[in-house]
Image (spheres, helix red, strand yellow):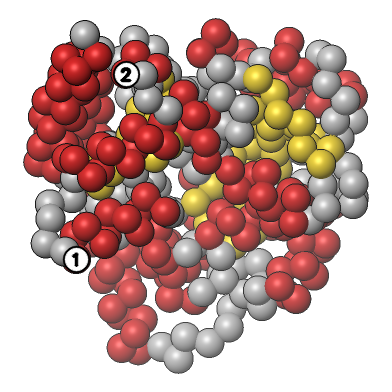
Amino acid sequence: MEVLDAANRRAREGHPVFHLEAGQPSTMAPRLALEAASRALNSMTLGYTEALGLPPLRERIARHYAGTYGVDVASERVIVTTGSSAAFVLAFLLAFDQGQCLAIANPGYPAYRNIARALDLRTHLVDCGIERDFRMSARDLAGVSADGVLIASPSNPSGTVMPPSDIRDIAALCRERGMALISDEIYHGLTYDCSAQTALAFDPEAIVINSFSKYYSMTGWRIGWMIVPADLVASVERLTQNFYISPPTLSQLAAMAAMDAHDELEGHVARYRVNRDRLLAALKQCGFEQLAPAEGAFYLYARTTPFGLSSPEFSRRLLAETGVAATAGLDFDPVSGAEWIRFSYAGSEADVSSAAERLVAWCASLRARRA
């Protein structure tokens, strides 16, 4: 957010800015979603809905699991939430008591740690660096004493996708040791050379979280969902009634329509693939020697050490001298993040291409000055 603020200040001053820092699509919500929202604005009161979400939307999400993954999910277990952020708060409250420990991969999405800390939970950071291709496995958890495990595939910031066998093994380990399993699947649909499998395929008792923000291009609509075990539905209903009353009605109606916008959404995925390939080629041309596997999401995670700069300094100078905004890795990795930087390729092809050209030229000048 600090990088985004600095980039916006630069833009207000009339300088060009290329946004590779923000983890959000540059496209609007799908046409079907916009049309559904327009109809609702002109014909409905838009009052509260059921605390767990509109039944037709919950049923549509359940059908999504059957059609996409071949997994049967009862619609009663689907909880519509105010973005995936609310789902994480609810999931942590459901799964853990005060002072218990959650194991998460490092690097990872910083809100995991921050939400856990706010709820008085402990976190155990599992080292999943370049040597492990940024993937958590059951082997990494063998000596970890925790009450639950959070996995993410595709992951932020690395864009790696966990093989189904790794998810299966972690699910089995969690069952064996009585640990809760929470799976962040908000980048499902955004994969390029493989496919992502839901944790529900291996453990029907897993808590799964997803969102309409990424694949469906609806970040600002603040709408997501979670799948919980049947015996936790009543608990999450009481929590969400008190915390949020209900998810936003307009967003739920738009989200239900968005789930039928397959062709438009797959067009976005094709654009992300083009952007990924263009930016990946540029980073290699720049001289980045270590890159995370770019299998999913819309991020490239790269090590800045060849340039003799920490990632915060690299990010600051890159923006100031070229207008290209990127996110320093300290957000995602409090241990080694000063050596890594994240680039998002969720923007337009023109913006990503222009940013890539500037990045190549700037890195060449850096290396020339170091020679």
**Is residue 135 depicted above or below 247 in this figure?**
above
Residue depicted at x 34% and y 32%: 314
Q: Which mark is residue 152?
A: none
- Say what amino acid the circle numbered 1 marks: Arg
Q: Position of residue 35 (x, y in %)?
A: 26, 71
On the question of residue 77 being in view, the answer is no
Q: Position of residue 45 (x, y in %)?
A: 45, 91
**Is residue 124 depicted above or below 241 in this figure?**
above
Residue 307: name its quadrant: top left
Q: Position of residue 249 (x, y in %)?
A: 49, 76
Quickly name the residue at label 2: 307
Quickly name the residue at label 1: 12
**Label 2 environment density (alpha carbons within 10 Å; few <14, some 14–19, many ≥20):** some
- Nearer to us of marks 1 and 2 is 2
Query: Residue 337 or 27: which is nearer the viewer?
Result: 337
**Label 1 environment density (alpha carbons within 10 Å; few <14, some 14–19, many ≥20):** few
Q: Earlier in the sequence, mark 1 or mark 2?
A: 1
